[in-house]
Amino acid sequence: MSRIIAADSTHGALYGTALNAQSNRSYSRTLNLRDREVVLTFDDGPLGTNTRTVLDTLDKHCVKATFFSVGRMALADPKLLKEYDRRGHTIGTHTFSHPFAMDRMPPQDAIAEIEKGFAAVSHALGKPIAPFFRFPGLRDSPETVAYLASRNISTWSVDVISGDTDPGANAAKVTKDVLARVRGAGKGIILFHDIKKPTAEALDGIITALKKDGYKFVHVVSNTNYKPNPEMVAKADAFRTPPEMATVTGRWTASAATVGRPEIKAGSVDVMRTEWIELKIANEQLTGNARSETANVGGGNGQTASGYVATSTSRSGGGSGQTGGAYMANSWLVTGQIQ
């Protein structure tokens, strides 16, 4: 690490230049970085082996990063979320369920996603997190940015996009693109996704090459913590969401409204479903129904050898949002190729 920067979230500072709304771009700024200084940021986790590989690589190079966690991913694996903190990284959030096109959502729904994300990640961690927020797909809107400013939460965009969620992304391509883009920009905030295998495989080489080029890595921290919205806390059912399937990253387009007839496009995809289930049927749900549903994602035959569905994992998180011990949060995520 070259140094540590304390980023100010007062009145909702906007960091990074890749913003969606024109009105927001006019007053966004990157961090006060010197030439050849970069900040590593990761979205969407935590998730299993890929996140652990990313964390181990950062440890190897003595580099600290900022992780923007999805609320229900944090609830699904609080132990891994706590590894971010234990290893000295900064934790912000990335909504509760990672909806796309937040700029087209009713403002009240977008605000609920923001607050529930902060509450869920803080709850899973067991302590407050930094008041740092990043929009899924970087799709900010004037209304939601103004709300974040009123809550003293900073909006985080990026200066360099890794492309690790692009169709056909692999470690070699991500490495080539990131190095070219960082060298072109000269400094800035880099966006990765720690749930992505290409990122986990490429990160060591990227950091090594940037060090060789004389780049330094800056750790961003906050002097303040997220404080819950009292109105959200007062809602007893704030975490009780209906069954939902939605894209985390990739080219699958599905939501609670379109889950019956989702739009499917060719390319790589990560699809996650979160629902509330009764504990007495948890075993059946996690080992039976979830796997049979994921088989349909890959064309209906469920054969991993076909290349349609490469892998599927089911994750569950208890202890969060329980009602009299009768319910638990259940999430599963499937990663593969749609053809």
Image (cartoon, rainbow, N blue to C red):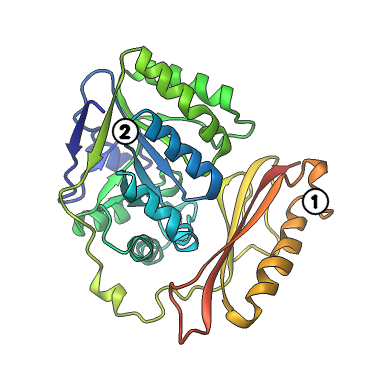
Q: Which residue is mark 1?
A: 299
Residue 104, image quadrant: bottom left
- Residue 116: which numbered mark, if any? none
Query: Residue 276, image x and y in percent?
Result: 55, 75
**Foreground: 330 or 145?**
330
Number of numbered discs overlaid on the protein picture = 2
The residue shown at (29%, 47%) is 155
Q: Is residue 328 above or below residue 309?
A: below
Q: Quadrant of the C terminus?
A: top right
Q: Quadrant of the N terminus?
A: top left
Report the side of 202 relative to 59 (left or right). right
Q: Is residue 48 above or below residue 151?
A: above
Query: Residue 80, image x and y in percent?
Result: 44, 53
- Mark 1 vs mark 2: in front: 1
The residue shown at (43%, 58%) is 79
Residue 87, image quadrant: top left
Query: Residue 271, image x and y in percent?
Result: 61, 53
Report the side of 111 relative to 205 (left or right). left
Residue 247 visible somewhere in the drawing: yes
Residue extending farthest bottom = 324
Q: Is residue 266 above or below residue 257?
A: above
Report the side of 170 relative to 142 (left or right). right
First of labels 1, 2 by sequence position: 2
Helix, strand or loop at mark 1: loop
* Residue kind at label 2, given as amino acid type: Thr
The residue shown at (44%, 33%) is 57
Q: Which residue is mark 2?
A: 17
Residue 56, image quadrant: top left
The residue shown at (19%, 58%) is 150
Query: Residue 306, image x and y in percent?
Result: 82, 42
Q: For label 1, count other residues whose C-alpha is less than 10 Å away and answer few (under 14), some (14-19) or many (20+).
A: some
* Labels 1 & 2 near each other (Cβ < 8 A): no
